[in-house]
Amino acid sequence: MILGLTAVSAFAGKGQVLKAMAMTVFGLMIATVGTDVITGAPRFTFNNIDLVDGISFLLLAMATFALAEVVMTVLKGQHKEEEPDMDMAALGSMKLSKEEVKEVAPTIARSSVFGFLVGVLPGAGATIASFLAYGLERNLAPKRLKEKFGKGALRGLAAPESANNAASTGSFVPLLTLGIPGSGTTAIMLGALIAYGIQPGPRLFVDNPDVFWSVIISMYFGNLVLLILNLPLIPYISRLLVIPRPILIPLILFFSITGVYLVSFNTFDINMMVIITIVAIFLRLLDFPMAPMLLGFILGGIMENNLSRSMTISDGSLSFLWERPLTLTIMSISVFVLILPLLRVLAEKMGLGRKAKPMETGASADSGEG
């Protein structure tokens, strides 16, 4: 969890590392709202019973990315811009060229392996894998391609989708081997298996091998079905691009608000979403990134649960952070990732300094000859 939090520097552009870290802390603060996992006492709820269960991830995601994006579009006046009449022919072919395949193939391979490893982590899930894979690919991209991220870069599209698919599969590893759900979806499946009297864990391979292999085989069938369904539907899904903004913006507002309300059937969530949207717009106007806040919120609850468990086992000592070789390695990587932006700045300054010296020497030589 600490390694995931320190990786927020991957989402930060040049000179924005401190802003990204500040937003991560803000996400951790939001994650503390609700019931204390140790004492069971409500905290930061302001005596409001609607906040006892904390703030919903869906609510936060819809407010910071959907509603805030819509309002920012309106504030910039982009909703009034006249768009040219587009048809499917104007969109061009949906097929990838050989050059595009060569460009995204390494990205898909890296992100798939990375996403699977993140998915194996108990409680991580596909959302964290998508964010981290995007940040990783953005850091690995050359300078000329890095500027295209956020503007439709092929690597930026392929990385989170590949990691998302791989993490969804990887989350079954802790479920089937340890009986620990790797994501929200596998948590529901865990409940269904227990309801049928099947206990996931090491004994599952011996007691219920038919269930285990059925899950494995279903993944192959699922991928084939998705392939058959998605390929013919791509031209129809791409028609969303030709919807005019005056129609698209109200639809986004309607589905976002309705979706959040239908989860809890509580009008308080809508009011909370409006408040978070206003805060998100203010932060975006100050050029603060939203992704680190969402990552901090996701990892906050998981990290707190595991920290309290570790502190209980170690009798309040923090020695568990460096006693085991694996833990020490992960902590060392976290520290390195944390100081990586500073090392980059120092490397760039040293590089510029080395380039400037020959120029200065040449200039003095020319002036001497004159």
Image (cartoon, rainbow, N blue to C red):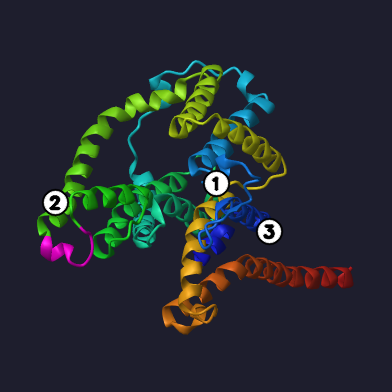
Residue at 67 percent across and 37 percent down: it is: 281
Query: Please, what is the three-letter code of the amino acid marked with disc 1?
Result: Val
Q: Residues within 10 Å of mark 3 (few under 14, many from 20)?
A: few
- In magenta, the rendered stretch is 199-207
Task: Give the number of the mark in front: 3 or 1.
Answer: 1
Q: Are marks 3 and 1 in contact (CB under 8 Å)?
A: no
Residue underneath mark 1: 52
Measure the C-alpha gap from mark 3 to mark 1. 31 Å
Q: Is residue 222 left or right of residue 80?
A: left
Q: Determine the image quadrant of residue 120.
A: bottom left
Which mark is on residue 190? none
**Placement of 314 over or under 21, stated as above or below:** below
> In terms of depth relative to the viewer, which is nearer, 107 or 199?
199
Position of the C terminus, as image quadrant, is: bottom right
Query: Please, what is the three-letter code of the amino acid marked with disc 3?
Result: Leu
Measure the C-alpha gap from mark 3 to mark 2. 48 Å
